[in-house]
Amino acid sequence: MFLPSALPLLAAATAGVDPHLHFSDLHLNPVAIDLHFFQIKWYSLAYISGILLGWWYLLKLIAQPGSPMARRHADDLVFYATLGIILGGRLGYAIFYAPHLLTSLGLFKLWDGGMSFHGGMIGTSIGIILFARSQKLDWLRIHDYLACAVPFGLFFGRIANFVNGELWGKPADVPWAIVFRDTVQTGMIEPARHPSQLYEAALEGIALFLVLWFAFWKTKARYEPGKLVGLFLLGYGLARFIVEFFREPDSQFSGTFFATTIHMGQVLTLPMIVGGLYLVLTAKGRRHRIEPIAGGQSVA
C-alpha cells in the first residue's frame, strides 16, 4: 500500500530520475566573502554571530533580579568564554577525533577545520571557573546564565556545517533527504542522506533555547544553582545522542567500535546526560538567599 504523497517519488525512481534534492542545486558556498587576497567563511561568521548574540542575550538575563554578576563582569566573561571555545574546541577535536594533530603543527591550523563542541564546552567551563574565582563570584550560577546563551552558537554552527556540506547523515530515502557531494569513493553513486546538520540545528539550537528560555523566564530555575546548566547538559546530551543515530560516523573511526556500535559523539554525551540529570535533581538543595550583584532586589 502506497500513500499518495509517495507516488511522485515512486514514479521518479521508476523513470530512473533521482527524486531527491542535490546539494549542488542549492548553490551554497562555504566562503561568505571573497576578496581574493582574503576570505571570510560562513563557519567563521557562525562563531562570531553566536558569540555576539549570546553576549547580547546574556546582558538581558543579568538585568533581571538575582543576577550573579554585573555588566562589567559579563563583558570580561565573553573574552574568557571565547578563548575557552577556541582553545578547548581545537584541543578537544585533536584528543577525541584526531590524535595525530597533537604532535604536528596542524594543531594550530584552525582554518583547516576541526573543532569539538565537547572540547569547547570543557574549555569554556574552565575559563568561567578561573574568571569567577578571580572576581569572587559564584561559578555555578554563572554557568547557569551562560548556558542559556549557548544555543545561539550551536544553531549557527550547525547551519554552517550544512552550508559547508559536511557532517552529513546516513543514507536515507525520506522525502527531505539530500544528495551531498563527495560522500563515497569516486565512481560510486552518491546516496541521498539525512540532513543531520539541520536536525542538530533544530534540536540543539532552537528546541534547547526554548526549553532554557521557559525555565529562566517562566520559572524560578535561576534561583536554584545548577538547574539551568543541568537542563542544558541534559538537553544537549539527549539531542546529540539521538541525532547520532541518523548521522554518518566520522571517517577516521570507520570499521571500529565507534562506527559499528556507538559513535564517539554518543560516548561523549553520556557524562553530560548523567551530570545534567544530577544537577537538575539536586538544584533545589542548593537554593539559598540570592544577594544580587546586579539586576535589582534579592530573592530568597
Image (spheres, rainbow, N blue to C red):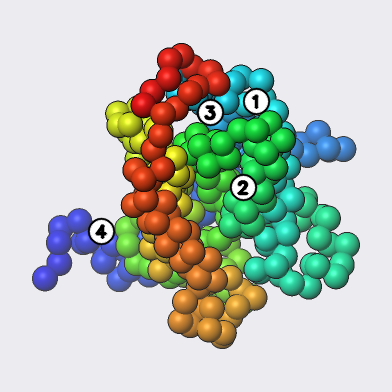
Q: Which comes before the other along the chain, label 1 or label 4?
A: 4
Give neighbour class at mark 1: few <14, some 14-19, many 20+ (Cα, 10 Å).
some
- Name the side, left or right, on which 69 lies relative to 6: right
- Above or below, comparing residue 184 to residue 46 in the picture: below
- Name the side, left or right, on which 22 lies relative to 31: left
| Mark 1 or mark 4, whichever is nearer to me | 1
Q: Are marks 2 and 1 in contact (CB under 8 Å)?
A: no
Q: CA distance from mark 3 to mark 4?
A: 57 Å
Q: Which residue is mark 3?
A: 68
Q: Which residue is mark 4?
A: 8
Q: Quadrant of residue 127?
A: top right
**Callout 3, which amino acid?**
Pro
Circle number at residue 73: 1
Q: Which residue is mark 2?
A: 125
- Above or below, comparing residue 130 to residue 294 in the picture: below
Give me the residue at 56% from left, 85% from top: 255
